[in-house]
Image (cartoon, rainbow, N blue to C red):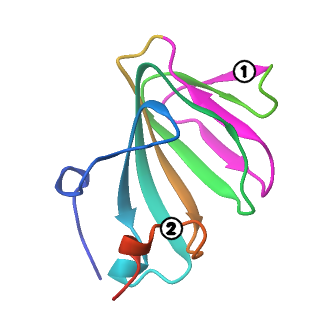
Amino acid sequence: MYIGHVNDVEEKDVQVAKETTIRWLITPKLGAKNFVMRYFVIKRRGEIPLHQHDWEHEIFIVKGEGYLTKDGKNWFKVVPGSFIYIPPNEPHGYKNEDSETFEFICLIPAKKEAVPEDEWAE
């Protein structure tokens, strides 16, 4: 078992996004073999542009209000307590228009192409 706190995990800038950080909370480095847990913070006027992956996402909104899109045109507002399932290969994007921060937990499969090398067990 591993017990940690989000504030003890390094916050890193998301290079392909604007005003967005990520914390890799649970990864193969800790022994997780099936899933990875990440914590995202998108600051006001920040965004993660439309993109897609070969893996699913499970998302839970923790703080702030934000918007998600699956086509780049229609945006859906989400609030704390909202949960989202994004199937593999579905284009998706996120933005924060007016909350101080828009924060969410995102779970993905523990796949080599999805997780940075430094989050794998040595």
What secondary structure is marked by label 2?
loop
Q: Earlier in the sequence, mark 1 or mark 2?
A: 1
| Residue 41 locus on image (x, y percent) | 39, 36
As drawn, is 71 to the left or to the right of 98? right
| Residue 21 locus on image (x, y percent) | 37, 40
Given the image, on which type of amino acid does mark 2 rest?
Answer: Val
| Image position of 35 with respect to 89: above or below | below
Question: Which residue is tagged 2?
Answer: 115
- Of discs 1 and 2, which sits in the foreground? 2
Q: Using the image as rendered, state which of residue 84 and residue 22 is in the foreground.
A: 22
| Image position of 57 with respect to 91: above or below | below
Disc sitting over residue 53 in the figure: none
Residue 10 inside the magenta-drawn segment: no
As drawn, is 70 to the left or to the right of 59? right
Are the residues flagged by discs 1 and 2 in contact, CB closer than 8 Å?
no
| Residue 26 locus on image (x, y percent) | 39, 68
**Callout 2: 10 Å neighbours few (<14), some, many (20+)?**
some
Give the residues drawn in magenta, as a range. Answer: 74-97
State how many labels appear. Answer: 2
As drawn, is 23 to the left or to the right of 91? left
| Residue 103 locus on image (x, y percent) | 42, 35
Between the residue at mark 1 and the residue at mark 2, the CA separation in whole angstroms equals 27 Å
Q: Residue at x 52, y 52 (%)?
A: 106
Question: Which residue is tagged 1?
Answer: 75
